[in-house]
Image (spheres, coloured by chain):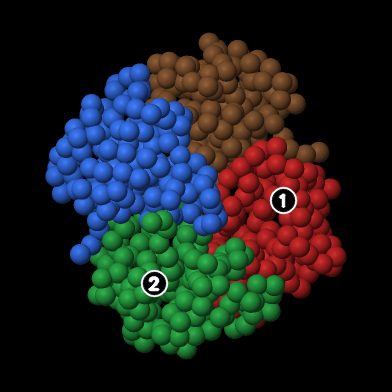
Chain colours: A blue, B green, C red, D brown
Amino acid sequence: MGKKVIVGVIGGGEATPETLAVAERLGELIAEKGWVLLNGGRSAGVMDASARGAKRRGGLTVGILPSRDNRDRGTSEHIDIPIYTGMGDARNCVNILSSDVIIACPGREGTISEVALALKNGKPVIFLGFEDQGLFRSGPHRRSVRDAATPEEAVRKAEEVLADRA
Amino acid sequence: MGKKVIVGVIGGGEATPETLAVAERLGELIAEKGWVLLNGGRSAGVMDASARGAKRRGGLTVGILPSRDNRDRGTSEHIDIPIYTGMGDARNCVNILSSDVIIACPGREGTISEVALALKNGKPVIFLGFEDQGLFRSGPHRRSVRDAATPEEAVRKAEEVLADRA
Amino acid sequence: MGKKVIVGVIGGGEATPETLAVAERLGELIAEKGWVLLNGGRSAGVMDASARGAKRRGGLTVGILPSRDNRDRGTSEHIDIPIYTGMGDARNCVNILSSDVIIACPGREGTISEVALALKNGKPVIFLGFEDQGLFRSGPHRRSVRDAATPEEAVRKAEEVLADRA
Amino acid sequence: MGKKVIVGVIGGGEATPETLAVAERLGELIAEKGWVLLNGGRSAGVMDASARGAKRRGGLTVGILPSRDNRDRGTSEHIDIPIYTGMGDARNCVNILSSDVIIACPGREGTISEVALALKNGKPVIFLGFEDQGLFRSGPHRRSVRDAATPEEAVRKAEEVLADRA
């Protein structure tokens, strides 16, 4: 009983085929762990791919949408529980605050803003291909950042983080 | 595949024993239908009771919290997926936008604000003991309001509404 | 030095000619007191009329908009400082939290939600034609509600409230 | 009549004496131009210093606060119009959306998130000491970024940007 483990996956709405494959595999692994996958919920890029992977393995997926209409066709069909915030980019905060750990795939401004908010709020973040040019490595929150080269390594590090926080 | 049916339950953080019993029974019935129960997520009043009922029947519960800390002890232990918004009462909007239909138990200002937002946004609302002194019965949105005397009737009317919108 | 007095004016985006005249006169009186007028910022109903009145008397007007685009043509031309929230109805919370006292003109669901949030947050509210059918008169927050028959009386009561809180 | 020019100033709640001096001078120059200065409103770092400068020159200052209580003692005394959002870091979006142009002083995660949101939303940003390690220089939005070495240069570039958009 009680709260499930929630793993946030962030990354671009536009993504290369390689990134999409990584995101989809990541979704599979998160589902296999029994964790809830939370992302931005749109039918695009890392969001759609990670949710697709999670559903293939019977996982549960939550999407925090910027839009307000719960018939919004831009919602990924792989999201079980779409949360419609109607607050645009301000929803990025909700993604971060609701996740126990965050895995960052490649992305641009939206993803950068989420990584920044995650670190500001003391959330552990695992970089899985997210490139920050060192920006988040020098500050007081640098210890919250971990690197992973593969989805498997990202999930293993997420597991360590979750064990530390338990 | 795709979005689950999400039923929002709103009502007071303070409630009489009778209201709590109704909310708990309502949660059971929602779970039995296979619907996701969404509420405000706190360990108080209608929120806690409805989630408890849903979990007793193996349902899935989502709470949209006003707080920002995902270790917040004020979160109901019957919530599977707590969404931390960090935006106080502004989260009431999220509850409404994310629900397919809303069932309103007795409540005060917070509940009134949610009923108002629901009607403004064209969401069907079923009054299950919520007393509005007729305020929402005269305006252009009065057709979105239905009355139910029991949890069973509320769920039956929710079913009708969902069929209409399908 | 320091914060100016901020008076929130709420009311319908649609309004009768009588209500518009009252709102415009109210805006004039608020400006004459040297208070900042804060409202929902749209070029409609009570928002537009109250801002027009305030500007005629050289007042300062702040609008809290639901939209995200600061070239939004739906913004009242009588607003000096439009704050674009991009969060739809969730901006109603911001209106309330930022006001020292609130004056409620006739309105429907949006206005009802704001009155409810105001009382929930302990803000004094003066009803200037806002009709609640008694809904807000019975609860624990009823003492926060005052009635006014004219804009002049509303401003006099706002003055009393502000003196009490100073 | 109509909307005033609003210049957003962002930067750290903690800042070096050099940065504080730059922020204060920037506030003076913004006020001298007749622009409204908008920032995060807290009595700390770049927020407090820039507002102090603006008030010294008779400018108008707006603060978008994360807190919900309009008696919050953490509000800068140099803010004329504090807007209380009650939504924590999600208020960063409001700062960005409400500004015509943004000037970024040195800052950390909060400031990075604001720069990212600004570029995502097509807002021009002038870097005045903000160090991004090149992160925002390679993407599609790089043309929205300008550099300034002094407050005077920042204001001159802001003027150019505003002229382009008029």
Tell whether label 1 touches label 2 (CB within 8 Å): no
Q: Is residue D11 above or below residue A61?
A: above
- Mark 1, Cα crowd under 10 Å, few <14 / some 14-19 / many 20+, is many
Q: Is residue C64 left or right of residue B49?
A: right
Quadrant of the rendered image containing residue A2: bottom left
Left of B108 or right of it: where is B57? left
In this orientation, which residue lies closer to the viewer: C133 or B153? Answer: B153
- Name the one closer to the observer, A86 or C123: A86
- Residue carrying label 2: B13
Amino acid under disc 2: Gly
Q: How many marks?
A: 2
- Whole-percent x, y for residue D145 in the image: 55, 19
Question: In the rendered structure, the residue with mark 1 lies on which chain?
Answer: C
Please state which of residues A24 and D66 is positioned toward the viewer in this rendering.
A24
Which residue bears the numbered disc 1? C42
Q: Residue at x 79, y 55 (%)?
A: C49
Q: How far across and down, in percent of the image, does residue A166 sit?
A: 15, 49
The amino acid type, in three-letter code, at marker 1 is: Arg
Say few, some or many: other residues with alpha carbon within 10 Å of mark 2 (under 14 / 14 to 19 / 20 or more).
some
